[in-house]
Amino acid sequence: MSIRKVAMTRSLMAAMALLGVVALGVDMADAQASRGRSTGSRGSNTFNAPPATNTAPKAQPIQRSTAPQSGVAGRATAPAQSRFGSGFGGLLMGGLLGAGLFGLLSGSGLFGGAAGLAGMLGLLLQVALIGGLVWLALSFFRKRSEAATASPMGRQGMMGQGQPHRSTPAGGFGAQAAVPAATQPLALEQADYEAFERLLVRIQDSYGREDIPALRAIATSEMASYFGEDIADNQKKGIQNLVSDAKLLQGDLSEAWREADAEYATVAMRFSVVSTDVERGTGRIMSGSSDRAIELTEIWTFVRRPGSNANGWKLSAIQQTT
């Protein structure tokens, strides 16, 4: 085998390995009830970023909601973001990836093996492509590392605190930022935190069983409709997302407040879950693992009627972290 072919083969293997890492991150994000999106409503705070916590320093904005935005009622949908970013930079990286891999597979080198100035340009573009892939992989691992190295509070974060300590900057359900003037702070009890943990488990389990009535009982009609759309989409594709064994690993209170007609609580939760996509009818595993749990960090908002007890909470929004 020539030196050129050896180099080409090694470059192809490296590129495919990095793409596999990125694809794995996409599958893990989409494999469970939220499908890796930020959806739902948080009352008057729907389009305001929740305060940072140790578990989730920053949240993605709500991408899909029935709440009105900027005085305009209706479903608000944020523009979709490419995995390579947006604008000219995203288009350039996507084009380089397609052209470069096609060149490798066709045996003509990453960018056609042109000579002279064109060859130099091809070399620079090759370096840029490999650098972009490395950046994507490092970004993925950095996010996983941040989730794994967050404050080691374990279950104390969800279960070990009663009244929030507003002087504490963040973490352990001890952080509660200033609330808008139109709202009032809401003090939570131990029973509320226990209810949030139960809802995490019940929602993941009900979604995995495709139990729409159960989801309607523990989520708002808006969130239940989103879950129903996702399940219907899976049914059309002939797959089922089996979700089970959800376990809370760490939780922080971000904020809790009272509005005129509802009470809200937003909590950041790091949890593990077993999630697999299987083929309907045969049960053949399409993605995921039936014996290995994955860890995820999300920000969930719950709502209840004023004066209700802990059993009145329902899921009203899920946000991803950044």
Image (tube, rainbow, N blue to C red):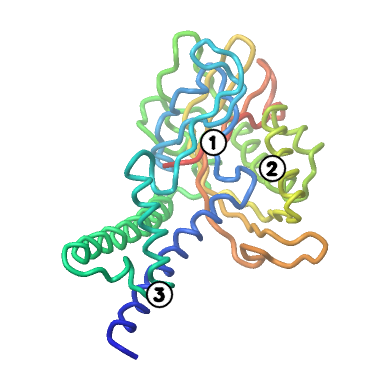
Number of the front mark, 3 or 2: 3
Residue at x-position 55% and y-position 45%: 36
- Which amino acid is tagged 1? Ser
Taking 6 as reference, is 233 above or below it? above
In front of the other: 229 or 266: 229
Residue identifier under label 2: 230
For label 2, the SS is: helix
Q: Quadrant of the N terminus?
A: bottom left
Residue at x-position 31% and y-position 65%: 111
> Do the CB atoms of the residues marked 3 and 2 lie less than 8 Å apart?
no
Number of the front mark, 3 or 1: 3
Residue 32, how many percent across, how many down? Answer: 63, 49
> Do the CB atoms of the residues marked 1 and 2 lie less than 8 Å apart?
no
For label 3, the SS is: helix
- In the rendered structure, the answer to whether residue 38 lies left or right of residue 216 reads left
Residue 71, how many percent across, how many down? Answer: 52, 10
- Which amino acid is tagged 3? Met
- In the rendered structure, the answer to whether residue 88 lies left or right of residue 219 reads left
In front of the other: 123 or 267: 123
* Label 1 vs 2, first from the N-terminus: 1
